[in-house]
Image (cartoon, rainbow, N blue to C red):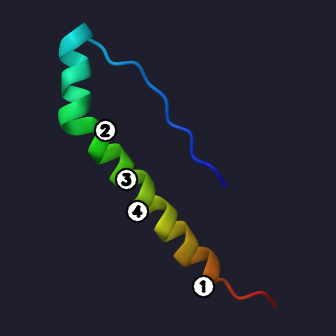
Amino acid sequence: MRDTFSYKSPLGILGVLADKLFLEKYMRNFIENRAKELKRIAEKVEIK
């Protein structure tokens, strides 16, 4: 599975600055945590 996340910052340079300060780290952590949880769920499923 591969996650692809793309977006364009609104507000020009202010948006880019906000991305670098806040959104970039938040989204990276969100996607990494999501992947870990999906892996945990997938490995827990019992095939009958």
Mark 3 or mark 1: whose residue is earlier in sequence: 3
What separation in Å lies between label 3 and label 1 (alpha carbons)?
21 Å
Q: Are marks 3 and 1 in contact (CB under 8 Å)?
A: no
Q: Which mark is residue 24?
A: 2
Mark 1 or mark 4: whose residue is earlier in sequence: 4
What separation in Å lies between label 1 and label 4 (alpha carbons)?
17 Å
Q: Secondary structure at mark 2?
A: helix
Q: Which mark is residue 44?
A: 1
The kind of residue on which mark 2 rests is Glu
Q: Are marks 1 and 2 in contact (CB under 8 Å)?
A: no
The kind of residue on which mark 4 rests is Asn
Q: Which residue is mark 4?
A: 33
Of the residues tagged 3 and 1, which is closer to the observer? 3
Q: Which mark is residue 7?
A: none
Mark 2 or mark 3: whose residue is earlier in sequence: 2
Q: Which residue is mark 3?
A: 30
Q: Secondary structure at mark 3?
A: helix
Establish if 34 lies above or below 46: above
Establish if 32 lies above or below 11: below
Q: Are marks 3 and 4 in contact (CB under 8 Å)?
A: yes
